[in-house]
Amino acid sequence: MQDQQAQLSWRDGDVPVSDRFDDPYFSLEDGLAETRHVFLSGNDLPARFRDGFQIAELGFGTGLNCLATLAAWRAAGAPGRLRYTTFEAFPMAEAEARRALAAFPSLAEEAELLLSAWDRLAGGPQDIADGMTVEVVTGDARETLPRWTGRADAWFLDGFSPAKNPELWEPALMQAVHAHTAPGGTAATYTAAGFVRRGLAAAGFAVTRVPGYGRKRHMTRATRP
């Protein structure tokens, strides 16, 4: 993947931290457990998986959410195809992603499947495994998402902290998320920031605040009626 590359440092050994946003890419406690709680359970997955299911994501980062999804899809044994489209302004180099994902040995097989396609992900949907295709749309999501022709059944809203990366949580972008959500579709995010919830509600989502992961008391779930 080309475009502006992520600039990062490492904390506690192999936890990547964005230099640009001064924020870790995943929870310092247990990034995989947080992903499963926030993005999978937050969208009622894997129970909703079906042929043609479309997941979209703001903020690809290390690809951890994608890996957790792939593992859940494979374990569920759902028939057909799962599509995963993710929007990322500052893609991470494959070597850095490999170092970060090594922290999750239970996903080693899925990680190798994703990493082997890493440099092709921005060139269009890539078949990863078992009917799951992944595409990374690079660039500013405020520009790229409105041009996307898809509609997601589930959104992973996983930008950096709204206080540090407000651009990815602007009301206009939440409107674009809503416009690209199928009826009955859902969205989930680790943040419960008031302006994020208000932006989702103003866009037309039914918004609820639910228990978060670890030390985060609350997170946000949203549904398009």
Image (cartoon, rainbow, N blue to C red):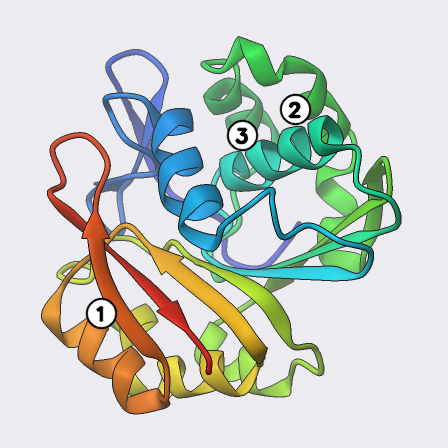
- Compared to residue 163, the image places residue 29 above or below, namely above
Residue at 53% x, 50% y: name it: 91
Residue 177 appearing in the image: yes
In which image quadrant can residue 29 be found? top left
- Between marks 2 and 3, how big is the CA–CA gap? 9 Å
Report the side of 91 relative to 190 (left or right): right
Q: Secondary structure at mark 1?
A: helix
* Residue 92: % across, % down: 52, 42
Mark 3, residue position:
97
The kind of residue tagged 2 is Ala
Q: Secondary structure at mark 2?
A: helix
Give the foreground label among 2 and 3: 2
Mark 2, residue position:
111
Residue at 60% x, 42% y: name it: 46
Which of disc 1 and disc 3 is earlier in sequence? Answer: 3
Residue 165 appearing in the image: no
Mark 1, residue position:
166
In which image quadrant can residue 154 be found? bottom right
Which of disc 1 and disc 2 is earlier in sequence? Answer: 2
The kind of residue tagged 1 is Pro
